[in-house]
Every structure is written in C-alpha cells, then in structure tokens.
Image: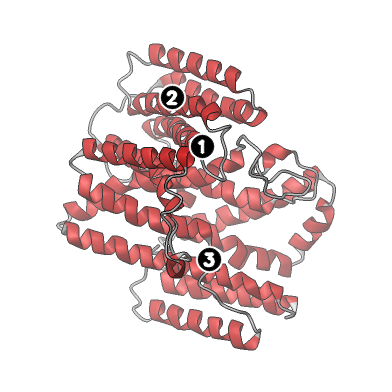
Amino acid sequence: MSGRIHAIDMLRGLSIIGMVFCSAYSWNCGLPAFMFHCQEPPPDYVFSPEIRGITWVDLVFPFFLFSLGAAFPAALGKKLQKGESPAGVALGLVRRWLTLVVFSLVIGNSGKIFATGAPEILKGAFLVGGWLALFASLVRTRARWLNPLGYVLIAALALAEKFAFGVELSLRSSDIIIMIMAWMALLGGLCWLVTRNRPGLRALVFAFVLAVKALSDYTGVLDCVTVPSFLSWLFSWNFCQYLAIVLPASMIGELLLKEGGNSPAGPVVLIPIAAAVTQLWGLFTRNVIADFGITVALAIAYALLSRSKAGKSCTVGLIGFAALIAGIAFDPIDGGIAKDYCNISYLLCTLGIGCLCLSAFIELENRGRKGGVLSLCGQNPMLAYTIVAGFISPALYACGLLGLLDSLSEGSVFWGLARGVVVTFAMCLCTAFCTRKRIFWRS
C-alpha cells in the first residue's frame, strides 16, 4: 500500500461524521441514553463522573486521535523523502501546533457572543463572519494575500466582540478537543520523528506513558506535579495520556506503508466488526464478564480463521483484539471504564476498537473502495469540524428549516433524529465538495 491510505481517511471521516451527528440531533426528543456520552445521560445531561461505561459517542474522539497518529508515517515520512530535514519537519510540527492553539482559542471565544443581548440575526452573521475569517486564514491557497486577510478579519472580529458587544475574551476559553489535538500533533509527531527507525524505543515510550498513567491513577503520588497557573490555559498533564492511543496508532500507520502482505481477508473481517459492536453492549450495560468472554472467543476464532491470511487487515485486527482484551481486563481494576476522568481501560479499549474498525476499512481499500464521503470528510477534518456551527446551522436557521425541525423535535424521536441527519448530510455535502475542489485547511 503506497500513497494515500484511504482506510485512515475513512476512520477519520467516521469520527467527524459521528461528532457532527451526535451534536446535531435534538436532546429533548426522547432518545435513549446510548445516543449520548455515557456520563451525560438524559434527561438532565449533567456530567456524572461516577457513571461507568461507554457509548458509541465516546468513541468518536479517540478514533480521531487514532487517525492522527496513524497518519504520521505517511504525512511526515513524505516530507523526509522529499529531502526536508528532520529539524525542518520538527519546525513544521511546531507551526502546526501554534496554528491549532490559536484555532482553539478563536473557536472557544467566538461562541461567547450568544450570551450577549445582540439580535439573533446579528449573532448568526457574526458566527458566519468568524468562520469565513478562519477559512481565509487557514485555506491552502496560492493567493498570498488571502491568509493575511483572514488574520486581519479574525483580529477585527475579536475587537468587535470585545468592544461592541462587551464580551470578555479569555485565554482560558478554548475548544478543548482542538487543544488536545494540538498537543498530540506536536508531541506524537516529535516522538515519531525521533523513533521512526527505532520502533522498540517508541514501544518503551508507550509503556512509560501507561506506567505514569497507572502511577497517577492508582497511587496519586503525581498529584503534586502541577502546571504553573499562568500556563494552565495552554497545557495539562492529562493531555499526555492520549499518547497511549496516538503512539500505537503511528506503529499501525508504519505497518500499512510496508510493501506486500496486502491480500484480502474475506468474510473473516466481519469478526472484528462484531467484536466492536459487542463492546457497545457489554461495556455500556456493564455485562463486563460476558463481554470479556465473547471478545476472547471472537479473538480466538479470528486468530484461527486468519492464520492463512497475509493481509494487513488481519494483522491490525489481531493487534486490536489484544488491546481490547487488555482494556476490558482493566475495567474492574479501574472501577469501570470511563471517558472522564479518562482511565487505562478507556485508553486501551478505544485503541483496540479503533484497530478493529480500521481493519474493516483496510479490507474495503484492498477491494478498491476509497471510502466515498467518509474518505472525503476524513481528508478535510478541520473544515468539516467547524462548518456546521460557522456556516450550515446559521444558513439553515436563516431559511427556517432548522427552526422548523427544532419545533417538530420536541418529544419526537423521529424528528429529533431527522434534525441530526439533515445537518450531518449538509456537512458531508459541503465538505465533500470542498475536498473534490482541492479546498483544504492548512491545519
């Protein structure tokens, strides 16, 4: 497999579509608890850290992290092959980190205008203007004036938000997902760069991350190691725990770039899919023992049936089963799997489920499928992530469609889901159009 790895794009696209869908359907329409974050169940949607388990919604962010790590060997390796020095690649990672940090702050502060008394139409126009300013500043273009114009527009909108609407802008108001992604792109990328020819060293770093995580969670001896308050808006030690997903994913990415071993796996690929779906039942309903037994049985069946296969999808699937079984084993040790506050069981289980899903996408790519809309959205993730709030939702409200769906969704599961489908479909159309027209964001 050479060139672009569409299987990774598909997994990233699945994550993006999942993110948009779970935030777009109505929360007041009577949907069951497995349609929300496990620790924010209906009807109050209040975060409860004592709740244990995961839903499909809790998988979308780790899938995005997994895709980020898996893409390092192709994206950064390509730069090295073109003759760019490791120092130059490292500098590029720093620039990307800075871009994402600023991106996070812009997104985090722009929504504050909705807490003001400004007219709704003005709020919508301001949000669209902010997204267009981001578009201008981040789009890859040969027009040298466009990116600087975007920076000027962002600064102008920030000043208008502060002085015209009285919004208090703050460094502590950031999009936490983008902030974590910024640090994972930097730390994970630098780690791959240093260990790209030494996989054993990277495995040691992965083991070290898990060991520090265990020491922190089970003993609390690291509680005294705090980040200075003046930097706490920018960095948290908790960000580093996600390297337990990013670093193994980078090893998977290296595996996919190797020549050979790319034969189709056949129907056996359905077993990892069955195992992934099983987790959404067992870990959510807390039938952990039954879930563990079923997963082990599926892993044994998969190992036996894939012995004659030389495909990379089978190798990735076996790695996924190993990580998943380890994660389920940690469930009772951690007092139950939990996304927040993230524990080892969550890190290993989502790593394993990510591998299992990727193995299915690898099989699709082996059969000549490039993923369609999934892949197109996965190739343009930041644009897809922001276009709903910054463009699609204001446009749909302006034409009255989203307001109508809001009123119909009250107490109606059908219309509540329809709202999510309409918004997600619009996002897919817009993102696919931009990707086909080679309109990408630099972030």
Q: Amino acid at mark 3?
A: Ser
Mark before the other along the chain sequence, 3 or 2: 3
| Residue 8 appears in the rendering | no
Image coordinates for residue 306, horizontal then vertical, percent: 37, 16
Q: Are marks 3 and 1 in contact (CB under 8 Å)?
A: no
Image coordinates for residue 369, horizontal then vertical, percent: 43, 36
SS at mark 1 in the image: helix
Image coordinates for residue 210, horizontal then vertical, percent: 38, 38
Q: Amino acid at mark 1?
A: Tyr
Q: Is residue 410 left or right of residue 68?
A: right
Task: Say above or below: 279 vs 296.
Answer: below
Of badges 1 and 2, nearer the viewer stands 1
In the picture of the structure, the residue carrying the numbered disc 1 is 346
Task: Say above or below: 68 vs 267.
Answer: below
In the picture of the structure, the residue carrying the numbered disc 3 is 174
Of badges 3 and 2, nearer the viewer stands 3
Image quarter hosting the C terminus: bottom left
SS at mark 2 in the image: helix
Q: Is residue 79 left or right of residue 238?
A: left
Mark before the other along the chain sequence, 3 or 1: 3
Q: Is residue 2 left or right of residue 46?
A: left
Q: Residues within 10 Å of mark 1 (few under 14, many from 20)?
A: many
In the picture of the structure, the residue carrying the numbered disc 2 is 321
Q: CA distance from mark 3 to mark 1?
A: 24 Å
Q: Amino acid at mark 2?
A: Phe
Mark before the other along the chain sequence, 1 or 2: 2
Residue 359 marker: none
